[in-house]
Amino acid sequence: MDVDQIRRTIFDRAVPYGVLSDVSALNRYRFDVGALQWDSPRTVPLLLEHNQALRVGWGVHFVHRPDGLYTRFNVASGPRGDLALARAAAGHRLSIGWENARYADGDHLRCIYAELTEISLVATPAFPHREGAPDARE
């Protein structure tokens, strides 16, 4: 994760593609490349712990790459935004919220389409994240 305290931005892979989630044995899923859709990054809020009352930022750039959905967020000024930046710098990760999912025939674990509704900073994400920061220059 790339956290810029001065510009108040967060850049990271929000979800890996093709990787099975680690929520529980009964609630597992994975996303195909490009399965996640959104109208505009600005319509996707950055939340704390999937709590709609704790909006702390908004999307500015999202891009599908072969290994996942990469996102950049602007973080709001004020105490909540400061908390979000501190949590991101301390190791919290991104986690997605979605709706209207469609799954592959015969494979209820493989999501082929979903509408992205929010992305949250969480202490324990559903997907494992690789070590090291993504390349924010791309």
Image (tube, rainbow, N blue to C red):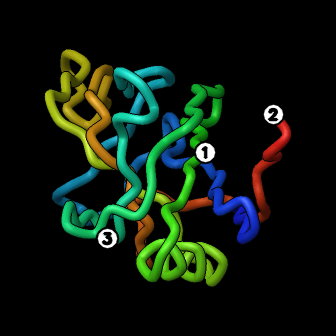
Measured as percent of width and height from the top left, residue 124 is found at: 41, 74
Distance CA(mark 3)–CA(mark 2): 27 Å
- Secondary structure type for disc 1: strand
Measured as percent of width and height from the top left, residue 42 is found at: 43, 35
Distance CA(mark 3)–CA(mark 1): 18 Å
Does residue 41 lie above or below 27 as drawn? above
Residue 22 can be seen in this image: no
Indicate the quadrant containing the C terminus: top left, top right, bottom left or bottom right. top right
Residue drawn where x is 25% and y is 40% of the image: 98
| Earlier-in-chain disc, 3 versus 2 | 3
In the rendering, which numbered label is found on residue 72? Answer: 1
Q: Which residue is mark 3?
A: 49
Does residue 4 lie above or below 113 as drawn? below
Distance CA(mark 1)–CA(mark 2): 11 Å
Residue type, mark 1 in image = Arg
| Earlier-in-chain disc, 1 versus 2 | 1
* In contact (CB < 8 Å): disc 3 and disc 2: no
Residue drawn where x is 45% and y is 82% of the image: 79
Measured as percent of width and height from the top left, residue 88 is found at: 58, 73
